Image: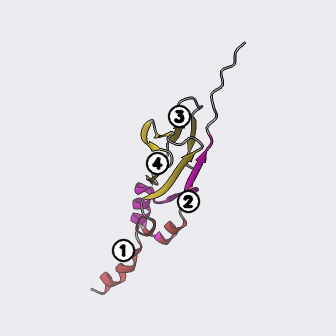
Amino acid sequence: MRKLILLIPFIALSSCATLFTGTTETIQFDSNVEGAVVEMEGLEVGKTPHTMKVKKSFDGIVTISADGYEEKKFSLPQSFNSIAILNLFSFPGWIIDFATGALKKFDRKGYEITLDKITLDKE
């Protein structure tokens, strides 16, 4: 029984980043063209202005496009989620945080994208 009580803190601290910060973050996408299409990995997810929850495991390309404008493609930069350090020596905690993407956090919570008009050069 005593050994079980000693294990409780280690179990409670496993997968700290997943428990404390979750596996998604809210990100806002906006552009100078209202109603521009927001795509993630080629799949339309909304139109600007658009706010959505993005899985921290997302490591793909976001595209903003509108008729008559050049499309913009960009990634969502991420960095290490320092809360994960609370896993200490809990190997299962590191595995869970890695599998859920909770080891990372998005560097920015909002993107204001400027789309340039397509110009037709006549020669």
Q: Nearer the viewer, mark 3 or mark 2?
A: 3
Residue under circle 2?
80
Q: Amino acid at mark 1?
A: Ile
Circle 1: element type: helix
Measured in 3D between alpha carbons, the distance from the residue under mark 3 to the one under mark 2, in whole angstroms, is 33 Å
Disc on res. 58: 4
Q: Return the residue nearer the eye: 27 or 101.
A: 27
Point out the tag, 1 or 3, that comes first from the N-terminus: 1
Residue 67: x and y in percent read: 53, 30
Point out the tag, 2 or 1, that comes first from the N-terminus: 1
Measured in 3D between alpha carbons, the distance from the residue under mark 1 to the one under mark 3, in whole angstroms, is 49 Å
- The answer to whether mark 3 and mark 2 are in CB contact below 8 A is no
Residue extending furthest front? 34
- The answer to whether mark 1 and mark 4 are in CB contact below 8 A is no
Residue under circle 1?
11
Q: Return the residue nearer the eye: 11 or 107.
A: 107
Circle 4: element type: loop
Mark 1 crowdedness (10 Å alpha carbons): few <14, some 14-19, many ≥20 = some
Disc on res. 20: none
Residue extending furthest right? 123
Point out the tag, 4 or 2, that comes first from the N-terminus: 4
Q: Which residues are magenta?
A: 87-114
Q: Nearer the viewer, mark 4 or mark 2?
A: 4
Circle 2: element type: strand
Residue under circle 3?
66
- The answer to whether mark 1 and mark 3 are in CB contact below 8 A is no
